[in-house]
Image (spheres, rainbow, N blue to C red):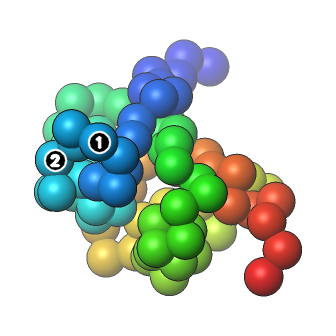
């Protein structure tokens, strides 16, 4: 099975990153580029963690898809290991 992945994306909460780096935007551009799996960084930033939790639908352990995005790529994030 061939998987095209980008395993190092930062959120808009990192320095010098576009303010448009939201879950839906990342998902839409990943799909346009043919990317099947995206891993986000900044998983310790409290607002980003909140957004990741609210804008996802869990598919498998540690893998989720963006809500409101048709044919969303899979996202992988460490937030699945953080206690609520």
Residue name at image x 46 percent, y 66 percent = 48
Reading the image, the residue beneath label 1 is 15
Judge from the rendering whether residue 59 lies leftward or rightward of residue 82; answer left or right: left
Labels 2 and 1 touching (C-beta < 8 A): no
Residue name at image x 29 percent, y 54 percent = 12
Q: Report the quarter where the N terminus lies.
A: top right
Residue 59 image-quadrant placement: bottom right
| Mark 2: few/some/many CA within 10 Å (<14, 14-19, 20+) | few
Residue name at image x 34 percent, y 55 percent = 13
Q: In this view, does 44 lie above or below 1?
A: below
Judge from the rendering whether residue 75 lies leftward or rightward of residue 68; answer left or right: right
Camera-side residue: 6 or 60?
Answer: 6
| Mark 1: few/some/many CA within 10 Å (<14, 14-19, 20+) | few
Residue 25: x and y in percent read: 21, 57
Could one spot residue 76 in this view of the protein?
A: yes
Camera-side residue: 54 or 46?
Answer: 46
Q: How far apart are marks 2 and 1 (CA)?
A: 9 Å
Reading the image, the residue beneath label 2 is 18
- Disc 1 secondary structure class: loop
Q: Is residue 15 above or below residue 53?
A: above
């Amino acid at each position: 099975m061939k998987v095209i992945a980008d395993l190092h994306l930062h959120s808009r909460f990192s320095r010098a990153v576009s303010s448009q780096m939201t879950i839906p935007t990342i998902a839409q551009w990943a799909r346009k580029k043919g990317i099947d799996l995206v891993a986000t960084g900044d998983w310790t930033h409290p607002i980003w963690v909140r957004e990741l939790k609210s804008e996802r639908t869990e598919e498998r352990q540690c893998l989720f898809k963006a809500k409101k995005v048709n044919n969303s790529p899979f996202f992988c994030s460490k937030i699945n290991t953080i206690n609520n």
